[in-house]
Image (cartoon, rainbow, N blue to C red):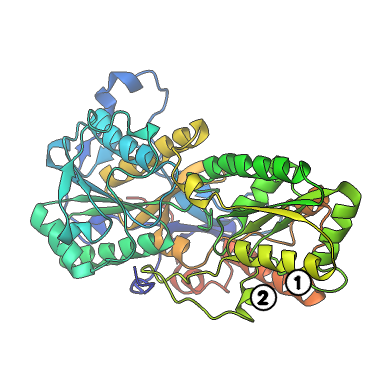
Amino acid sequence: MDGTPPPKTGAKLAAGEAGYVLEDVPHVSDYLPDLPTHPNPLQDNTAYSVVKQYFVNPDDTVCQKIVVHKDGPRGNHFRRAGPRQRVYFEPDEVHACIVTCGGLCPGLNTVIREIVCGLSDMYGVTKILGIQGGYRGFYARNTIDLTPKSVNDIHKRGGTILGSSRGGHDTMKIVDSIQYRGINQVYVIGGDGSQRGAGVIFEEVRKRGLKVAVAGIPKTIDNDIPVIDKSFGFDSAVEEAQRAINAAHVEAGSADNGIGLVKLMGRYSGFIAHYATLASRDVDCCLIPESPFYLEGEGGLFKYIEKRLKENGHMVIVVAEGAGQKLIAENMKEMGQDASGNALLLDVGLWLSQKINEHFKKNKTTINLKYIDPTYMIRAIPSNASDNVYCTLLAHSVVHGAMAGYTGFTVGQVNGRHCYIPFYRITEKQNKVSITDRMWARLLSSTNQPSFLSKQDVDDAKVEDERTAKLLDGSPSNPKVEDKVVPSNSNGVK
């Protein structure tokens, strides 16, 4: 995906009392109003016969902001995920496809497996295609048939059985392929760029008047997709990162003036480094993209390293891959972009290793520094038990939404409840670690590192936090809410 935002078509919003705003998702009946509906096959599924109320109430919504003041607005809500009593696709007419895009992440195969098994076991769907090699697979690669038998044990493997790639998004070719193959449900597993691409596909599908549900499952190992509680694979990544940190701690503690330096993933958001540091308790310093740092002088990184080595004789540093890029760029040139339009980052781990060694050599102090980069080891692992359950819930939720006729949405967990979120909400900004909240303060307390922040850094972070809070409230600072809300006494339910 080249980073081009989807066409501006206006949000589908409804207003209620006390500042209630429903940010609804599109539905195939919005542009195909005479479609018939059918009873949900789940009502005859013996596995679900014991469930007291299996079908979701059509008025159920999920609040994005759950901490509110007594007189404050109720804020933005999303449509609750889950099975509906009526569906817009009969099982024998469904021809679904699944595509994985972007980088690898623990849990990809689990999501593929559970979409296939969910369509088959819950709804009796038999025609499911796997698109190989990312978006370009729609028009440049073969497809494979997916059945519960063929995907039975793929969740035990890392990576994706469908293959993946960056870029390759050609909207017209993709929708031509969808139309030619008779596909009517498209499931896109990918990050913000891939979800943006899915939004563009949906717009073209709607323009052509096709009865096709386009749905996304957000994937990012960095946990940088906004709105949702977390992305699948994140817990597995944090857990696997512990092995690298433990190894660095052993190496550092076994040598005089030992320093273990671990580089973890986190291009623009330092969540993996942040949570891995909190979980480990062996880390003395954590550096992330959101928190600038400097090397020289009082309060700088070098002074802190000297202090920790004098006190403990060793230390462990965790650095996210996107940290310190401005510092590095001062004496190294930029390296361009990848096929998805992401900046190719300079290697902060190698750079920091070199700078630390140079500093102590100049001061005639012997250190033993070991640098560990587990990036591709972490990306390639299968998901852990917690992520497997999470992937299952995401997959089943997205299947229920597509069968109910919702389209142009991504599925995610918000405040512990799964819901359907418009594509634009998860592509308009990136989720970042807030360096002015208590979670970051807990890390600083755990590591005892300096904040490295100037007053201007703190003020800028507070401004960004306030802007984000206004978006959550649905205030006039969000033009989508200000311009598009219409009163509704039915919550816009289909």
Secondary structure beneath label 2: helix
Inspect this view and state whether residue 4 appears: yes
Q: How crowded is mark 2: few (under 14 residues within 10 Å), some or many (20 or more)?
A: some
Q: Position of residue 283 (x, y in %)?
A: 74, 48
Q: Which of 341/392 is in front?
A: 341
Corner quadrant of residue 287: bottom right
Image position of 182 with respect to 468: above or below:
above
- Give the left or right position of residue 284, taking residue 289 as reference: right
Residue type at mark 1 is: Tyr
Query: How many dots with numbers?
Result: 2
Q: Position of residue 26 (x, y in %)?
A: 32, 58
Secondary structure beneath label 1: loop
- Give the left or right position of residue 405, taking residue 172 as reference: right
Q: Residues within 10 Å of mark 1 (few under 14, many from 20)?
A: some
Quarter containing the N terminus: bottom left
Which residue bears the numbered disc 1?
Answer: 294
**Dot label at residue 327:** 2
Between the residue at mark 2 and the residue at mark 1, the CA separation in whole angstroms equals: 8 Å
Q: Are marks 2 and 1 in contact (CB under 8 Å)?
A: yes
**Residue at the spot 58% in from the left edge and 61% down from the top edge:** 321
Corner quadrant of residue 401: top left
Inspect this view and state whether residue 209 appears: no
